[in-house]
Amino acid sequence: MKNVKKIISAALITLFATSLIGCNMIEKTPEGIAKTEVAKVFDTKITKGQIEAQLPGVIKQLQTQYGTNYTTNTDAMTELTTQKQKVLAGLINEEIVTYKAKELKLVPTDAKLNAEINKQLLEIKKSLGTDAKYKAALTQAGITEEALKARIKPSVIQDALKTETTKNVKVTDAEAQTYYNANLALYSTKPNTIHLAHILVKTEAEAIAIKKRLDAGEDFAKLAKEKGTDGTKAAGGELGTFKFDDTSMDATFMAAAVKVPAGKVSAPVKTQFGYHLIKDVARTNYPAKKFEVVKSEIEKTLLAKNKETAWTAAMTKWTTEANVTKIDKNL
C-alpha cells in the first residue's frame, strides 16, 4: 500500500513539474513576452510589446555606437533602460490623455483625426525636403509610415483635450504690466549688447582664489593669461560682444553674464565647462519700448505660459486619479 502511495505521489509531482515547465515555455514565447504587463493606467494595461515597438531606432543607434553585441556593454544597456523608461512615460501620458478625452467626449471624429494626422505627416515630409529623405528617416527610426501615423494620433487627441482644458485661461493687465517691468531688457528699442571676458578654471576653489586676487586689485587680463584653461587665455579672457539673448553661448553662462554690473566681475559661475569668472567689460543698454507698444506681444507670451501651467496642473491631477502602477522589472 505504501509503495502504491509513493508511486502515485511521484507521478503527481512529475505531472505538476511538467505543467510548470509547460507554462514557463508558453510565457517565454515572443507572444507571451510581448503581452507582459509593465504598467497599468486606470484599468488599461501597458505591455512590454508596446515598449518594444518603439525601440527599433534606439537599438540601431546602440548597435552603431557599441556594435552588434551591445547587450554585453553596461553603458549601452543603461542607455537602453533609460530609453525604455522614456517610452513608458510617453505611453502612460497617452493613456491618461485618451482616457480623459473619451470621458469628456473630446476625441475627434475619425475623419478629423485622419485629416490632422495626414496634415502633420505632410509637414514632416516638407521639413525633410525630399521623399527619399523622408523614407530614409523612417528606415533610420525603424518604423513604417503606418506606425508613424499611429504615433501622431495621440498627439492630435491631446491637442483637442488641451485646447478645451485651457480655453478659459486669461492674462490680466496687471500680469502683463508686472512682466513688462521685470523684463524691460527684452523690449529694448534695439538689442542690448554686452562685451564680455572670462577666466575659466576646473574647480570652484581655483575660481574663488582668483576672485580674491581680483578683488585685491590684480589685473583681470593678466590673471586670465596666467590661470585660464581655455582658448581665450592668450587674449586675456576676451570673448567679444553679444546680445543679451545670444544663444551661441552656454545658457547658464549668459544668464549670469547679463546680471553682472558694468565693469564688475561675477562670483564663480558653474557651467558644463567648469567654473567661470565673468567680467562685464562694457554694455550698451537701449531704452525699452512703451508698454502699450508691446502689450499684445507680452499677453501672447503670458497666455502661452499660463495655458501650459494650467495644462500641467490638469495632467498632474489626472495622473493621480489614474492610479498608475509600474512594474520596472518587466521592462
Image (spheres, rainbow, N blue to C red):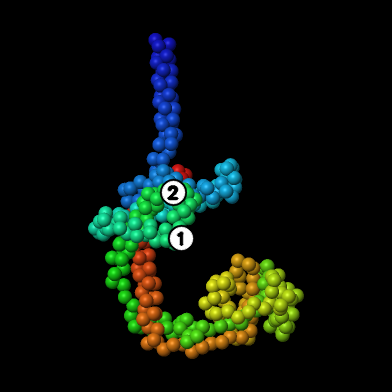
Q: Is there any visible trace of residue 38 in the rendered image? A: no
Residue displayed at 59% across by 45% down: 67
Q: Secondary structure beneath disc 2? A: loop
Measured from the top left, where is residue 314 in percent x and y?
34, 63
Q: Residues within 10 Å of mark 2 (few under 14, many from 20)?
A: some
Number of numbered discs present? Answer: 2
Viewer-proximal residue, 122 or 328?
A: 122
Q: Quadrant of residue 204?
A: bottom right
Q: Is there any visible trace of residue 140 in the rendered image? A: yes
Amino acid under disc 1: Gly
Between disc 2 and disc 1, whose residue precedes? 1
Q: Quadrant of residue 97?
A: bottom left
42 over 287 or under it: above or below: above
**Distance in Å between CA atoms under marks 2 and 1:** 19 Å
Amino acid under disc 2: Ile
Q: Residues within 10 Å of mark 1 (few under 14, many from 20)?
A: few
Measured from the top left, where is residue 33 in percent x and y?
43, 38
Task: Residue 55: give its label.
Answer: none
Residue displayed at 43% across by 46% down: 53
